[in-house]
Image: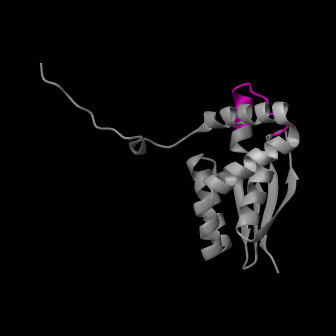
Amino acid sequence: MAKHVMDRRASDNKYLHRDFHISADIGIAYVGEKYGDNGVKEYLRKFASAYYAPLIGDIKKRGLIALKEHIEKIYEAEEYSEHVKFELTDDRLIVDVDSCPGVTHMKKKGHTPSKWYIEATRTVNETIADLADISFELLSYDEENGKAKYQFYTRR
């Protein structure tokens, strides 16, 4: 009998990680229950500063367009591009999300996002902005569906 070998890599498959949102929220909730609000923020700051280091460097080099492109890629990977809108000027990027793919997926699967899930938006983006020498402001957030409006802007 002939031996058949299949050579596959993870990169050969479409990347879609919706269940990651549930796992991430469970992890964030664990940190929150064990170490409180400040523990969640500290954990997310450490994560963001390491994981997003290449993005932070790109923002420093190319400006807000790098951040817009990054967010666009996330929503494309989530197959959720129609739910995000951008306003980009020389000194400001406004992101308007009509519902969060993570919150939508979690609720569809019967998981209620923890009270700390908002920090995955607020603290992570604040950290990216701080390290890229820009500013971040969360303008609105709806816990029901993750609808959010936020902005990044250059410091003067």
Marker count (numbered): 0
Rendering quarter of residue 61: bottom right
Residue at the extreme left: 1
Q: Quadrant of the N terminus?
A: top left
**Would you say the magenta stretch is mainly helix, strand or loop?**
loop
> Viewer-proximal residue, 4 or 35?
35
Place of residue 75 in the rendered image (x, y in percent of width and height, measured from the top left) = 62, 52
> Viewer-proximal residue, 22 or 147?
22
Q: Is residue 97 above or below residue 65?
A: above
**Which residue appears at 83% of the width and 36% of the height?**
35
Q: Is 18 a magenta residue?
A: no
Place of residue 41 in the rendered image (x, y in percent of width and height, measured from the top left) = 81, 47
Q: Is 107 a magenta residue?
A: yes
Q: Left or right of 131: which side holds 6? A: left
Rendering quarter of residue 130: bottom right
Can residue 155 be seen from the camera position used here? yes
Stretch of the chain drawn in magenta: 104-116
> Viewer-proximal residue, 117 or 97?
117
Can residue 98 be seen from the camera position used here? no
